[in-house]
Image (spheres, grey):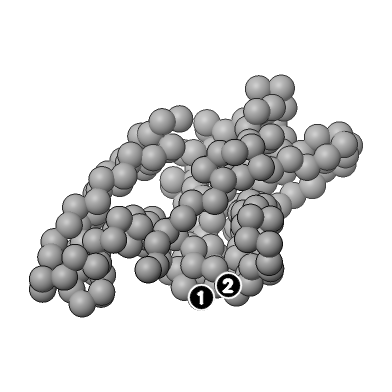
Amino acid sequence: PCKVEIIANDQGNRTTPSYVAFTDTERLIGDAAKNQVALNPNNTIFDAKRLIGRKFEDATVQADMKHWPFEVISDGGKPKIKVQYKGEDKTFFPEEVSSMVLTKMKETAEVYLGKTVQNAVITVPAYFNDSQRQATKDSGTISGLNVLRIINEPTAAAIAYGLDKKGGGERNVLIFDLGGGTFDVSILTIEDGIFEVKSTAGDTHLGGE
C-alpha cells in the first residue's frame, strides 16, 4: 500500500530549515546555515518564501525587509538578496535561493533511496497566487527537478494522513497548521480523491520562530 515516508537529512532531522548561508570559504544549506546565523546574520538568507513571486514594491515585502538582517535590493522591480560570498558581493533571486534548498533535499532523498530523483511535487501555501506558484515551480526546475505539480500544503497534509482514503461521499475537513513562521487554517472538501480548498485564514507572521 502507498504510504508517506519522511526522509531524514544528514543531521538525522525530519525537517530541514530553509536557510542558505555564505561565508568567506563556503556555502551552507539547512541546519548548518541556521546554526551559524548569529555569527553571520547579514549573509544568512531565510524567508525566501516571503519574497518568491513578489515585486520589490509589494507592501508585504517592504514590511518584511525591516526585520531581515540581510539586504534586499530591486533588480528590474524584482527583489534580489545581496550577500558577501568569498569576499565578493553576490546577488540572488528568491527562486535561486529556494533552488539551493531544493537541491539539498533532492540530494538527501537520493542518498536515502540510492537512486536519482527526477520528479517532484512541491507544496505551497493555499493562498499563493499564480506568480508565486510559477516562481516556486521555477525553483524546482533550476534544481534539475521535473516538477509534476504544485499542490496546496493543506491538501498535502490531508493526503499524508490518508484523509482521501476514508470514503463515504463528500467530506469537509479542517486543516490546522501552526508552522515555523506562519499559522494557516484551511477548510477542504474531499470527494472521490478530489480536493478543493474552500477557504483559508490565519496569520502569516505567527509560528515557532
Please state if 115 lies on the left or on the right of 191 as rendered: right
Above/below status of 198 relative to 71? below
Query: Measured from the top left, where is residue 41 in percent x and y?
Result: 67, 28
Crowding at label 1, few (<14), some or many (≥20) Cα neighbours within 10 Å? few
Q: Residue at x 30, y 55 (%)?
A: 161
Q: At numbered mark 2, what does the secondary structure look like: helix, strand or loop?
A: strand
Picture mark count: 2
Which residue is rendered at x = 69% and y = 31% of the image? 42
Where does label 2 land, which residue? 119
Which of the two residues, 195 or 39, is positioned nearer the viewer here?
195
Picture quadrant where residue 138 is located: bottom right
Q: Which residue is mark 1?
A: 148
Given the current orientation, which residue lies at the most extreme top position? Answer: 39
Closest to the observer: 1 or 174?
1
Q: Residues within 10 Å of mark 2 (few under 14, many from 20)?
A: some
Query: Is 33 left, or right, of 132 in this rendering?
Result: right
Q: Nearer the viewer, mark 1 or mark 2?
A: 2
Residue 127 shows in the view: no
Task: Compare residues 32 and 62 and report the one nearer the observer.
Answer: 32
Q: Are marks 1 and 2 in contact (CB under 8 Å)?
A: yes
Name the residue: 68% across, 66% down: 115
100 shown above or below 142: above
Tell me the kind of residue under disc 1: Leu
* Residue 5 percent location from the top left of the image: 46, 55
Question: Residue at the spot x=53%, y=33% of the render?
Answer: 66
State left or right for residue 180 relative to residue 154: right
The CA distance from mark 1 to mark 2 is 6 Å
Place of residue 199 in the rendered image (x, y in percent of width and height, measured from the top left): 21, 59
